[in-house]
Amino acid sequence: MKILFVGGTGNISSACAARALDLGHEVFFLNRGNRPERTPAGVETVRADIRDAAAADKALGGRRFDAVADFTAFVAAHVETAYALFRQRTAQYVFISSASAYRKPPNSWMISEATDLWNPYWQYARDKIACEAFLMERHRKDGFPVTIVRPSHTYSDGMLPSSFGSGGFTVAARMLAGQAVIVHGDGSSLWTITHAEDFAPAFVDLLGNPRALGEVFHITSEEALTWDQIHRTVGYALGVEPKIVHIPSDFIAEAAPARGAELLGDKTYSAVFDNSKIRRLAPNYGQRVPFSAGIRRSAAWYERHPDRKVRDPKIDAEIETILKAWNA
């Protein structure tokens, strides 16, 4: 197949592109060409900024694809542009949504694709819901061949998940320095984290599959861990016992509103997923990288890249602000 990845060099898209190449597909990237070091051999880059619709249209020219996977659409205007660009250029358009779109607070501890979409806390999630609504309307009205995929918390080598995100080394540096790290709530809610190498095989199985058109899938691990277990696993991989301070999410939201919106709109509630739908269509679905192994890989990645062991002063200050308010 001829597959176009809009983006292609990010956390999830890199693993998906590598999987497609391994299977012998012809892979293209549409991006600005700013990260050539993350473009694998064998990929042809169509250089354009998709936010400039005219430039992207010109760069794409008369190319047609069996599937387009869009990892860069976050608001309704983005998918409106994608619809105009790709409705005559692809047999399948795959929109990367988010499992944060599912109802918060949830009505059930088990989430399926039939769970309704509603998130009063986090604008990011509401924007993804709006994107899905536009695309499904276009599918119903004019047959636009859309497939929607909702990843949950997905990480790759060099990422260390925590209550404060997965990117960067700040929380890990605090652990190594013996400083307090914040875990929202009491640390006992269940959370599902998926390695990108486990996400990619099932995702690529959907590409070119006519049974996926007009359908929605989430692709996640089936390993559910508490947030305390997640932070302790990261600490163990670094060789330390983390000093965990439990702080309620609503308190964090008062002290740091942006962080609180993300927590209340996503991480605060247990998230365990029923993956039976993706399993029916994706023969390569399954977990091959348990969290404990994935985190050891990430810790080893940082040992190979010591220059990336950088603390973000903004996140450090945010954590200290929340701790100071809590201790007061």
Image: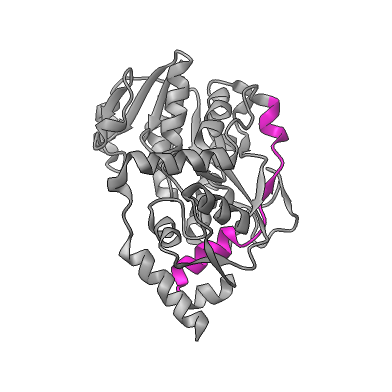
- Looking at this rendering, what residue extends furthest in the front direction? 239
Q: Main secondary structure of the magenta part?
A: helix
User: What residue is drawn where x is 39% and y is 35%?
Assistant: 84
Name the foreground residue: 180 vs 318.
180
Q: Residue 57 appears in which quarter of the rendering? A: top left
Left or right for 118, reference 69: right
> Could you tell me if residue 144 is visible in this image?
no
User: Where does the image place residue 204, in percent across and percent down from the top left?
Assistant: 53, 25
Left or right for 301, reference 250: left
User: Where does the image place residue 20, in percent across and percent down from the top left?
Assistant: 46, 21
The residue range painted magenta reads 256-280
Left or right for 239, reference 58: right
Left or right for 281, reference 91: right
User: What residue is drawn where x is 47% and y is 76%?
Assistant: 323
User: Where does the image place residue 297, in percent across and percent down from the top left?
Assistant: 47, 38
User: Where does the image place residue 254, in percent across and percent down from the top left?
Assistant: 50, 78
